Structures are given as structure tokens and as C-alpha cells.
Amino acid sequence: MLQTRNGKRTGAAMVKIAVDMLAQGMIDDKTALARIDANKLDELLHPIFDTDALKSTTVLAQGLPASPGAATGQIVFFADEAMKYEKSLLVRIETSPEDLEGMNIAQGILTARGGMTSHAAVVARGMGKCCVSGAGSIKIDYKARTMTMSGKTFSEGDWISLNGSTGEVYEGKVQTMNPGVTGDFGKVMEIADHFTRMNVRTNADTPHDARVAREFGAQGIGLCRTEHMFFEGERIKAMREMILSSDTKGREKALTKLLPYQRADFEGIFEAMEGFGVTVRLLDPPLHEFVPHQQATQKELANEMGISIDMVKNKIADLEEFNPMLGHRGCRLGITYPEITAMQARAIIEAALNLKVKGIDARPEIMVPLVGTVAELKNQADIIRSTAEKVFAEKGMRIDYLLGTMIEIPRAALTADHIATEADFFSFGTNDLTQMTLGYSRDDAGKFLPDYLSKGILKQDPFQVIDQNGVGQLIEMGVTRGRSVKPDLKVGICGEHGGEPSSIEFCDKLGLNYVSCSPFRVPIARVAAAQANIKHRK
Ligand code: PEP
Ligand code: MG
């Protein structure tokens, strides 16, 4: 033998070879699992481009591979025009909650700005929709309804194609294919479940996403971002009313409108995840994401609230922050406006009790975001507990629930032994923890990260792969210090890293109980969690 090399193979071939060799007794199940590159399973879960068709097209721009898959469609620049074509591709400088419906309709999303945890990226991954974000070389002119890439100008209605797995943008229409999930794929999952220690949960904000994730094998929800539940239709109006209210009375009026929506959503999600824990995170939006930017929407809101459009504009200006990511968000909102926390706690508990009456086993876990001091958590925990007791008394019955916190601010990790005294569980929010530990804005890092990577200053994008030497120390400290006062403290991760194999291995090493990731990454996480356990313990 002169030389050997690893055989290059597609994701489907990788699964088939491993399962065939296992069936023929050439390898055992542990070895079969070791032959699976978890990341490559992605190919089995999303549409891909026809390789022949790809050969006759050109790459016009490169962005971040924000949400995998292949998409081809006609350009639209405004979300409310996504219906215009049978297959549209939404092209935006960046997206905001106002674009949600259009994002849902479009085949894929392309943004010029924003990183791997930008609004477009996170929402698209949740939907399992192809997205390329932060393609900085694209110039978009909303007025002219044109975009320029590599010196070529494209107009609304022109065909382009996106590869969400590589971040490439192609000219024209490129044929896509839906790879089938075969029986071999199921066999790999079965072996993985046999060897795993950590649970795999999902990040899901709708009953539909929860069901999809459960079909992929998710054992609960690790993060339900409640702000994402306010994006659609009438809800966003009530949400805006709440944000723009100048007093408690106005806020309470808007919250009363939001309560039934929330309760119904939670009922749907709890039911879809019956028998498994569902971690509902209290409101954590940077408020600027919700305010209306278009004149017509501002006018509509002014009418609704019975104030002038100028007053609406002034309030929007008031809310503007120099650094919204470090601003009035997370538990800071619930501390300033306790009525928001009370409404959300009520909606969660009422939903769980309504299901109990129907014999459905709902297991709510209420999570407080962006905690940096134990006093913040205690403040919110008091509101949640007293609201829950009030609802129990009103309904004449009780349910068990957990109350925990995100660990996503460095100070929370440093003081985890104090914070654990108020928490039933921790969930590491590694998106924010990375942002705040490295000091890189989640929204703006796309401008310099490619240079850092190409110059070797960073080996990997820390928003995709946990920076084990830096951020990892804080995670380890959080786990150790938290469990020093509560040895059985349940600890998980719900940042985007929860679906990335090397980060999952790191979480397993630290003894986390679960990882949580977007629905379409659940099978990948199941394989990675099993491989990690074999490596560390078997
Ligand atoms: C995080 O910060 O890691 C997280 C999961 O929360 P979000 O991305 O919503 O800030
Ligand atoms: Mg966060």
C-alpha cells in the first residue's frame, strides 16, 4: 500500500456506508457512529442544489451561511410583496419583526448586514429556511428596487439563488433537489440515542416548530423566545402599543390584549411538547426591533392609541438607544415594567392549568433573561411566584413549574453561586455571552470577522463555535459555581452553539444536562451528543 486518503463522500453516502458496514458486521455500532460527521447530516435535512445545474452559474457575492439549504427565486425587496411571485427571495439590508410574514412566504432570505445571530439568521434557522446574511458587498437601493453584486445590477423580479450552507449567492435560477430522509438515517439516530447522555431540546416559538423538532427527536424546548410570538398581525400592534405607552395604565391595557394570544400560544406549544420540559423565556427584545418604521404603520398606531403621529414619532425617538444590545432589554424590562413579567407568568401558568384540565401533561419552566446579579433574578422570581400563587388560588388547582435563568452576562457566570440560590436551572445564552466576553457586537461583527478569520487572528467564528479558551472558562465557572451550592442544578445551553458539534462536545465534557438548538439541527445535535459521551465516558 502506497498511500491512503479519507474517501470524500456526500452526507447520504456517509450514512449509507456506515449503516451498510454495520449490517455486514465489518464494524460495530460505536464505530459506525464515529464515522458520521454530524455537520454533514445537514445535507439530509434541507434542499440542495442540483450539482450539474450549479456548474453553469456564477457566484456573485459571498455572505455568511446563516441558515442552510438551497433557495432559488425572484427578488423582492419588501416583505409585504413576498406573495408577488410564486417563488420569491427576500433581499433586505437587514430584517426586522415587521418582515416576519414575508420571510415565511419567501423561499429564502438574503441580507447585506448582520451576523450569524442577526434577526434574519435566527428567525430563518428557526423556520428551517435558507438564509445568507451579512453579504456586505451587495448594494441595495430600496427606492429604485435594485441591488448590485459584482458590478451587475439586478431588479425586482430577477432570479437569483442562495446557498445557505456556504453563504454563496448565484445569478439566475438554479434547480434544487429535496434529498429524502432514508431508513439508514433513522438507524443512525437509533444508535446515537443508545449512546447519548445529554438530552437534546429545541429552540422553538410556535407549536408548528415544536412539532417539527419533536419529529426530529427533540426532548423538550430549551428556549421559547416569547418576543418572537408577538411578531404577527394584531399582536405586533398590541405589542407596539405596550412599548409606546407612557404610563402603567396604557401598558396594562395593551397587556390585557396580549395575554390571550400568549396563553393560546403556550397551550399549543405545551401540547406539542406534552411530557417534556418547555423553557419559556420572558420578554427579551431590544425594543427598537418592534417599533414601526413606516409612516403608514406609525399613523395606524397613532389612531389606535388615540394620539398624534408626532407623538408616536417622539416616543420612537425616545426609545432609540446608542447600544440597544446593552440597553433596556431582558430582565431590565421586567424590572422597570413588572406588569409585563406578571402578564407573562400568568399566561404560562393559566395555559398549563387549562391543559391539565384536559389531561395534558404540560411542564413549564420559566426563564428570566439577561440576569447579571442575583438581586435582578430575585426581583423577577418574586413577581413570577406571587403571580403563580394568585392563579393557583383563582383556579383552585396547582401544577409544578421550574424557575430559572439564562447565564449570558459574564457577571452571571462569575457569581453563579449566588444566582443559583434563586434558580432551579441555568441555561447558557452563548450568543450574548460571546458578544459580551469578546466585546464583539452580534449585529456588527460581520464587518470585521471575515478579516479576523482570513488573517488567522481567530480560527473560527466565535458566534458559531464556542471560544473554549475564553467564553468556555465562563461556562465552566458557571457550572461549577452553580452546582457548588446546588449539586443537582439542571444546566443547559440555548445559544446557537447548542447545535454545533464541537461546542456540544465541550458542553458534554462540562457535564451539562442538555443542549438546545433550532429544529433542523436536532438530529445533528443528537449524533454529536452521543459521540461526545462515547469520547468522554465509554
Ligand atoms: C443567547 O444570548 O445566547 C440567547 C439564546 O438569547 P438571544 O439570542 O435571544 O439573545
Ligand atoms: Mg441572549
Image (tube, rainbow, N blue to C red):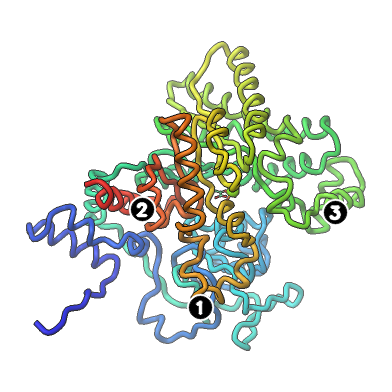
Q: Nearer the viewer, residue 475 or 121?
A: 475
Residue depth check, mark 1 versus mark 3: number of the one nearer the observer: 1
Residue type pointed to by label 1: Ser
Q: Which mark is residue 509?
A: none
Mark 3: amino acid: Ala
- Left or right of 31? Residue 171 is right
Examine the image and state in which quarter residue 142 appears.
bottom right
Which numbered circle lies on residue 454?
A: 1
Q: Earlier in the sequence, mark 2 or mark 1?
A: 1
Q: Secondary structure at mark 3?
A: helix
Q: Which mark is residue 317?
A: 3
Q: Secondary structure at mark 1?
A: helix
Q: Residue at x 55, y 73 (%)?
A: 452
Quadrant (top left, top right, bottom left, bottom right) of the N terminus: bottom left
Label 2, label 3: how many angstroms apart (C-alpha)? 45 Å
Q: Which residue is mark 2?
A: 505
Disc count in the image?
Answer: 3
Looking at the image, is mark 2 or mark 3 earlier in the sequence? 3
Q: Residue at x 56, y 76 (%)?
A: 451
User: Residue at 51% across / 78% down in the picture?
Assistant: 454
Q: Residue at x 40, y 65 (%)?
A: 47
The CA distance from mark 1 to mark 3 is: 39 Å
Q: Position of residue 158 (x, y in %)?
A: 59, 78
Mark closer to the observer (2, 3): 2
Q: Is residue 224 above or below residue 446?
A: above
* Horizontal and vertical percent position of residue 80: 67, 60
In the rendered image of this protein, does residue 169 appear above or below residue 47?
A: below
Label 1 environment density (alpha carbons within 10 Å; few <14, some 14–19, many ≥20): few
Cα gap from disc 2 to disc 1, whole angstroms: 25 Å
Question: Relative to residue 234, is residue 491 drawn left or right?
Answer: left
Element under disc 2? helix
